[in-house]
Image (cartoon, helix red, strand yellow):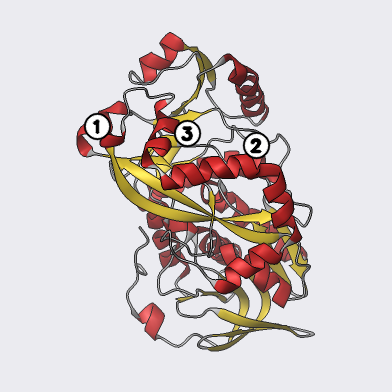
């Protein structure tokens, strides 16, 4: 789903500069938003973005369902809660300004059993505490009024939840920034007394400050700059199916289950994309590579990093039952579809076809805890975004402001 640089191949062919005021590593939606924010605050400041791939938004930005979250799920007071609510408003305004496809279509979270009602109550409490606009509780009839093919005993409606073309946002941000250079994977980080040197695949760049928005590779670059290895990034592969065109009428907007609050995943859901497709998914399967968009893709280094990390084995011991369910979803399409048919009963395996897969860069502590908030850290002359999975795309413009504030305080 990722597309080439918006402003022509010269962005890849032109040699990157050897000096700048601030270097941003990573041309996903977050790195580009950070670069844009830094330039907006000081247009005289030279900002350069280094990207390992030959296109912007090649990883998490370009491989997701495109949902603009409203802020329901996140612990009140957390960075996710604050920055998601702020960022969703700003992202909608930016899409409108730049002509990027977006829609505020709303979402229904559906409880299908009495055992889920307490968790639905907690989601409503969190949403209201976080200032999510328009939340309302639904009964079975209320669910059917919004989503005629959905079924449940209770629901929560979030009219402010939406969808956007995050790849289109990234391309618009890249046009705003200008100085984005592909094929520049960073290989070494060398802090100096008054600067920081980034040795990359096409040379070296000396900067006054650096911001690392490197997604799945954020922990490696942080350690290269002198940071602690904790937390480690472990990759989770999320595969999507899509409804066949003649069955898209089963979903009007977005339909979600009630998630397990102890995990940073939202379960198999159905989402309408800006392209018109209706996606089913994702799975959440521990991956053998940080770019495992194909199921069989394995990187020896990535797999070794996961297996050598003590937190991985502690996570396995705690969540092996959940892992077994995800393995079943990945292995058997019928099991995958049944997970969604709990709340859309008409859905059958004949209604779907393969879509695409994404990889979630999830931070995992040495103690085995899946980190459920945005995490930032500092090393000499650098700021590192250590954990920024969903809703980072939704929150990108607000996160950029937060990062720029931190850079100014360095």
Q: Is residue 169 visible?
A: no
* Image mark for residue 74: 2
Instruction: Examine the image and state in which quarter residue 216 appears.
Output: bottom right
Residue 136: % across, % down:
53, 18
Name the side, left or right, on which 168 lies relative to 367.
left
Q: How crowded is mark 3: few (under 14 residues within 10 Å), some or many (20 or more)?
A: many
- Residue 95 location (% of width, % of height): 41, 48
Return the residue at label 3.
161
Look at 59% across and 73% down and name the residue there: 301
Residue at left 37%, top 56%?
A: 168
Q: Residue at x 71, y 43 (%)?
A: 318
**Foreground: disc 3 or disc 1:** 1
Camera sees residue 400? yes
Q: Residues within 10 Å of mark 1 (few under 14, many from 20)?
A: some
Residue 65, relative to residue 186: is it above or below? above
Dot 3 or dot 2, earlier in sequence = 2
Q: In this picture, is 11 found above or below 34?
A: below
Distance of label 1 from label 2 (alpha carbons): 32 Å
């Amino acid at each position: 789903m990722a597309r080439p640089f918006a402003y022509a191949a010269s962005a890849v062919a032109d040699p990157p500069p050897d000096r700048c005021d601030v270097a941003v590593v990573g041309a996903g939606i977050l790195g580009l938003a950070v670069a844009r924010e830094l330039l907006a605050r000081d247009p005289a400041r030279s900002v350069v973005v280094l990207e390992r791939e030959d296109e912007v938004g090649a990883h998490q930005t370009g491989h997701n369902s495109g949902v603009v979250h409203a802020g329901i799920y996140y612990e009140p007071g957390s960075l996710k809660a604050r920055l998601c609510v702020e960022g969703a408003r700003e992202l909608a305004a930016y899409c409108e300004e730049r002509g990027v496809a977006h829609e505020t279509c709303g979402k229904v979270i559906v409880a299908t059993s009495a055992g889920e009602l307490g968790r639905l109550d907690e989601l409503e409490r969190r949403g209201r505490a976080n200032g999510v606009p328009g939340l309302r509780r639904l009964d079975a009839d209320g669910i059917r009024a919004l989503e005629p093919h959905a079924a449940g005993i209770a629901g929560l409606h979030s009219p402010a939840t939406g969808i956007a073309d995050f790849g289109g946002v990234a391309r618009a941000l890249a046009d705003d920034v200008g100085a984005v250079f592909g094929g520049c994977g960073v290989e070494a980080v060398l802090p100096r007394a008054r600067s920081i040197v980034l040795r990359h695949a096409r040379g070296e760049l000396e900067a006054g400050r650096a911001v690392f928005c490197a997604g799945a590779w954020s922990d490696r670059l942080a350690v290269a700059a002198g940071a602690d290895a904790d937390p480690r990034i472990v990759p989770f592969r999320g595969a999507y199916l899509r409804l066949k065109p003649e069955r898209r009428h089963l979903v009007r907007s977005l339909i979600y289950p009630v998630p397990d609050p102890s995990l940073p995943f939202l379960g198999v859901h159905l989402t309408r994309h800006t392209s018109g497709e209706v996606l089913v998914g994702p799975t959440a399967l521990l991956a053998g590579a940080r770019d495992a968009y194909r199921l069989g893709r394995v990187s020896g280094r990535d797999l070794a990093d996961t297996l050598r990390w003590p937190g991985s084995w502690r996570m396995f011991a705690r969540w092996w039952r959940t892992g077994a369910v995800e393995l079943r979803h990945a292995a058997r399409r019928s099991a995958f579809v049944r997970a969604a048919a709990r709340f859309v009963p008409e859905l059958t395996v004949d209604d779907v076809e393969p879509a695409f897969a994404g990889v979630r860069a999830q931070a995992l502590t040495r103690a085995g805890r899946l980190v459920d908030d945005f995490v930032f850290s500092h090393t000499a002359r650098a700021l590192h975004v250590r954990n920024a999975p969903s809703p980072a795309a939704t929150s990108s413009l607000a996160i950029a402001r937060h990062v720029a504030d931190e850079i100014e305080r360095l």
